[in-house]
Image (cartoon, rainbow, N blue to C red):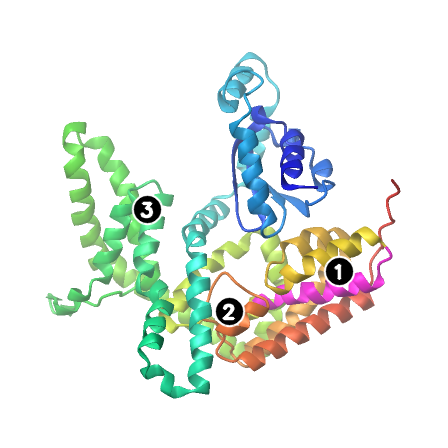
């Protein structure tokens, strides 16, 4: 089935244009917001050739397609949406509102139930994650380049004096040089403020000239409080900006609002949010380091083992700013290599399923998903293999636990964020140990799944 056929089938099975509020995509998924999620025929969508699974996450219906395919299907889906008229002759949201006003069809009750399940904590972690997700390509590029340069310097230390290598070093450090500005920009945008003002407040906290200022006997420190302080000031600035727009007359708002946001926000940031941010940032850094350093193998075993269930619950989003803070403060995150072992456990578990199953369709699914799984993209294996079968998911968790124990024992750190699997090795400060942990996770996941077993699905007849 080609991309257009996949998009067309999805379009009809989710209820067509009248039921689609908005659509977007990420590396592996087509993401849809629908008026009525019950209208989507989830089982039929799962059976579309090329679809690896579905996931209903808070207020979003996600269709898992895998890397490359997700982007292409999204393009075809966008063409269908842009060239199709609503059956009611109106936009889907407006049409749905009219229908709702005319008859009671249960949508309001459905929305209330979904809103009840969307806890403030989950919604907040999702918004925080949205700040960092757009920056992941930068972390990947700079992290991989940092890893490659690190390997090169070990082979030939004289390379550090080469101008071209020095230029590459600048490139590899670019994400960290502008990290606060990017966080400030994205945070303000996510919380409804001006992205530019968020970036400016972040620059105030990072400006090198702060080092020349002594206020009331206190030396100001550029970048104090790290990303945590920037997050707080940008979010505060967004709320302050929206408040000022409501109370300042429109004719004065254009110049008074940004000025007051800068003056008030900048002052509060320097005197309050920077010191508070520093305390929080130091706590995060010390807690993560102490947990791995003192807990060692046990901590790694627990974290690696529970990570897949946490991903399923959506709690993994809380780790994004923590990874970013550790990278900003130490240059590496010692948590990512441990957590990445969960994906490695998936590989071992899926290979065990491949060897034992007699279902040809399941074998084809595993073969198509294994390469991207090895490269660190685990959704196709989770939703297409281990989770539907049940017991192999437990085997994958066991594999992740053993791999995590290895990474934590040797405190392996990674200089990137947003990647895992085999590519993460190039960004770690101990490539041999990382690779050993990866292989152990493969073996443990395979062995656990082989011993636990699973109910082999019967081959469907045509």
Q: Secondary structure at mark 3?
A: helix
Residue drawn at x 57%, y 23% is 18
**Going by the image, does 97 lie left or right of 258?**
right
Q: Residue at x 87, y 49 (%)?
A: 458
Residue 440 lies in quadrant: bottom right
Instruction: Indicate which disc, 3 or 1, sits on the residue closer to the N terminus.
Output: 3
* Helix, strand or loop for disc 2: loop
SS at badge 1: helix
* 242 in relation to 231, above or below: above
Q: Mark 1 and mark 2: span between their CA atoms?
A: 24 Å
- The residue at which mark 3 appears reads as 188
Task: Report the span colored magenta.
Answer: 340-358
* Type of secondary structure dominating the magenta stretch: helix
Query: Which label number is shown at residue 335?
Result: 2
Neighbour class for label 1 at 10 Å: few (<14), some, many (≥20)?
many
| Relative depth, front residue between 179 and 277 | 179
């Amino acid at each position: 089935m080609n991309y257009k056929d996949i998009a067309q089938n999805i379009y009809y099975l989710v209820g067509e244009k009248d039921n689609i509020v908005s659509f977007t995509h990420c590396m592996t998924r087509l993401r849809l917001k629908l008026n009525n999620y019950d209208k989507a025929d989830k089982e039929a969508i799962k059976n579309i050739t090329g679809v690896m699974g579905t996931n209903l996450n808070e207020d979003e219906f996600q269709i898992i397609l895998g890397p490359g395919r997700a982007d292409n299907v999204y393009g075809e889906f966008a063409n269908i949406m842009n060239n199709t008229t609503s059956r009611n002759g109106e936009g889907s949201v407006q049409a749905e509102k009219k229908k709702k006003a005319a008859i009671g069809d249960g949508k309001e009750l459905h929305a209330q139930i979904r809103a009840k399940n969307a806890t403030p904590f989950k919604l907040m972690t999702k918004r925080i994650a949205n700040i960092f997700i757009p920056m992941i390509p930068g972390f990947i590029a700079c992290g991989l380049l940092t890893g490659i340069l690190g390997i090169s310097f070990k082979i030939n230390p004289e390379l550090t004096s080469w101008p071209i290598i020095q230029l590459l070093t600048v490139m590899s450090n670019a994400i960290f040089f502008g990290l606060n500005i990017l966080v400030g920009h994205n945070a303000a945008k996510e919380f409804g403020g001006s992205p530019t003002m968020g970036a400016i407040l972040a620059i105030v906290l990072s400006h090198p000239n702060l080092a020349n200022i002594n206020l009331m006997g206190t030396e100001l420190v550029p970048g104090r409080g790290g990303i945590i302080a920037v997050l707080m000031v940008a979010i505060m600035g967004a709320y302050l900006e929206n408040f000022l727009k409501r109370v300042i007359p429109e004719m004065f708002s254009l110049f008074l609002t940004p000025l007051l946001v800068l003056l008030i926000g900048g002052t509060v940031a320097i005197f309050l949010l920077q010191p508070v941010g520093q305390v929080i940032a130091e706590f995060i850094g010390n807690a993560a380091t102490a947990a791995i350093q003192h807990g060692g193998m046990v901590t790694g075993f627990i974290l690696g083992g529970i990570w897949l269930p946490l991903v399923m619950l959506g709690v993994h989003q809380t780790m994004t700013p923590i990874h970013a803070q550790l990278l900003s403060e130490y240059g590496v995150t010692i948590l990512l290599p441990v957590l990445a072992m969960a994906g490695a456990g998936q590989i071992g578990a899926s290979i065990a399923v491949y060897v034992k199953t007699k279902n040809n369709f399941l074998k084809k699914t595993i073969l198509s998903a294994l390469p991207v799984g090895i490269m660190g993209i685990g959704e196709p294996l989770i939703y297409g293999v281990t989770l539907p079968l049940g017991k192999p998911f437990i085997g994958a968790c066991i594999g992740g636990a053993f791999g995590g124990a290895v990474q934590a024992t040797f405190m392996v750190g990674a200089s990137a964020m947003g990647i895992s699997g085999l590519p993460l090795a190039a960004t770690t400060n101990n490539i041999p140990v990382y690779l050993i942990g990866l292989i152990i996770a493969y073996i443990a996941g395979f062995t656990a799944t082989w011993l636990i077993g699973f109910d082999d699905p019967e081959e469907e007849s045509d």
